[in-house]
Structures are given as C-alpha cells and as structure tokens.
Image (cartoon, grey):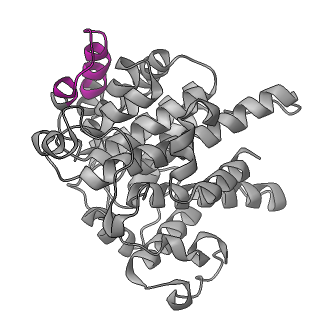
Amino acid sequence: MILPSKPTLETAAVYRARVRGCLLGGAIGDALGYPIEFSSLDRIRATHGGRGVTGFVPGGGGVVGRISDDTQMTLFTVEALVQAHAREREKGIGGGWALLLRQAYERWLETQTKPGPDQAAPPADGAPSGGLITEAWLYSRRAPGNACLSGVAQMYAPDPWLALDGKPGQVNPDSKGCGTVMRSAPFGLCNPADAAFAMAARGAQITHGHPTGYYAAGALAAIVANVVAGDSLEGSVLRALRVLERHPGHEETSIALRRAVDLAATGSPTAEKAESLGAGWVAEEALAIGVYCALAEPGVEQALLLSVNHSGDSDSTGSICGNLLGALHGDVGLPHGWVERVEGRARIAALADDLAA
C-alpha cells in the first residue's frame, strides 16, 4: 500500500493496524502450528481431542507460543525492507533492497549457527549493524528448511531487475519448498501488488530457484498488497492471479490458488478439504492451504485453527493464513489472548510500526 503524501490520521492508523496484524497474525499461526508440524491429523486428534489443537500447546521446554523459522525469516525480511526505505529516504538510493535482503538473511543464518549475539560475526562491509541479530531470543534453531540454510550460505543476491521468465534460478534450482512463501508477506505491506510480486519472487531466489517456489512467494505478497489496499480477500486473490498469470511457468501456482478459491465455496470447511490441497511442504500447496482456510472459515480464530490442524507443514500454512487474516482485520481483529502470549510480541509490533512509518 502506498499511502498518500498527506494521509489522514484515520488512514494512517488503519494502515498501521493492518501491518501489525499481518506480522502478528503470521506469528500466531506459526506458533499454533509449530508443535504439531510433523504430526498426522490422526495423531493430532488422538493427542489433543477431536477438534485437534484449540490454542497454543507446549513446545520444547514446556513453553507455549513459540515461533519457528517462518516468523524468524519474516522478521529479517521486514528489517531489510525498513533499511532499504531508510536508505532511499536519506540518500536517494533506490534498488538496493536485494543486497540488503541477502545481508538480512545472512544475519538470520548467524542466529541458526551461533549460540548467541556475542558469537555473531561482525557485519559485512556496507551492511547495517545492530538490529535483530543482537537479540538473544532469536538465536533458536526451529526446524529451518534445508534449502533456506544452504541457499543463504551461497550468498547470492538477485538482480533487482531480474526477469521473471519461468526459468530455474541460480540457487537450488529444483527446490520449491514453502520456505519461499512463508517469509514473503512483508513485501506486500509496503508496495503495490505488481511491485510486491516482483520483489518477493526475486527475493525468494536467494534460496529457492524453482519457478513455482518463487511465483508462490510473489503471489502471497501481491495478495497481501491488495488486501492492505482495501480489497476483499477473495478479490485480492483473483487480482493477484491476474498478475501471476502474466508470467511464463505460472501454471502450478495458479492451479493451486484457483483450487483453493473454488474449494472455499463448497460449504463447511474441514481439515480433510484442506488436506485435499496437499500437505504444504512445497510452496504452492502451503499458499493454497493458507488461502483456503482464510476464505472458507469466517471466524479468525477458527480459520487459524483450521490452517494448522492437518497432516503437513502446519506452522507454514498457519503463518500464511495468519498473514492474510491479520492484513485483512488488523491487529485488533486477532484473538487478544494469542497476541499477548505469542513469542516476541513486543518486538514484532515495534518492527511492524517501523515498516508502517
């Protein structure tokens, strides 16, 4: 969303609430799904009852509300975008976001390989210092994807004008894991849909080169941008599909999204319907499940629970669903008790306000 040069107080407040909602909603969905990420639906129901999980459940060490690598990487994405905007304002330098994004993901990789901030490597030449890498709570390895780890280690920075031509990218060219899409909502919070799509798709290629992987990332960012601009969720998906379908090799992602929209219109939502879209381990399936749950279930709390109670990548599908619902309803529309208990709440809200500013 591009705010007018002189937004009203009301417009600015709504925008800030949507940005906060998107990031906090993603973190809530992530935290709901993380403890059950590798469990089958039958196992989830056997352990937690016929409805599955109905709120935060204890993870490692008995702690509830813990986020995973999905939210970690999302926050580092936000940090890069904030830095890029600051550089453009202060120095009039545009187009540097790709390098800043790669550097942000390198800092995330430090949190996955070092025990704490005092062991982190100094910033690279020209890279900003301070920020998230100094925060001890982020130094936790929460089942990060192999392609994310290996991709960041290759230190590839995409050309910000790189053609999105449906050809495999340079890094992990066969990988379309959901690690692309689960971190890409922030691009839609500060750009119109076309630009959000392009930036997210190019940024995804830092770690994943399969066209479906990077197109799914672009599609989520475009949907978020449309929602933040005030469109309905279904309208936002359909408009994002028009952007997506302009690109060669879009078919896997487009088919998955259209299946999600059609399925949401078929009556009462169920876990079995969500599972018919896949397990969410790959990007287009995770996006489809998140979109289906956000569309099919009118209640925010119930939609978030639907998005994690399935056999598959529950934290990623929950994160995507939460991004969409938070962008749609704002932070005030999220379940208050979950907002209060999700890990890193205050820092997530502060970073959201930095982005909204």
- Residue nearest the observer in this picture, 310 or 119: 310
User: Picture coordinates of residue 19 (x, y %)?
Assistant: 63, 40
Q: At 48% from the left edge and 38% from the top edge, which residue is drawn? A: 323
Q: At 32% from the left edge and 53% from the top edge, which residue is drawn? A: 34
Which secondary structure dominates the residues rendered in magenta? helix
- Residue nearest the observer in this picture, 229 or 101: 229
User: Picture coordinates of residue 36 (x, y %)?
Assistant: 25, 51
User: Picture coordinates of residue 298 (x, y %)?
Assistant: 43, 18
User: Picture coordinates of residue 230 (x, y %)?
Assistant: 63, 20
The single residue placed furthest to the left in the displayed view is 42
The span shown in magenta is: 255-274
Q: At 51% from the left edge and 41% from the top edge, which residue is drawn? A: 25
Q: Is residue 89 magenta?
A: no
Left or right of 48 in this view: 202: right
* Quarter-of-image position of residue 95: bottom right
Left or right of 39 in this view: 258: right
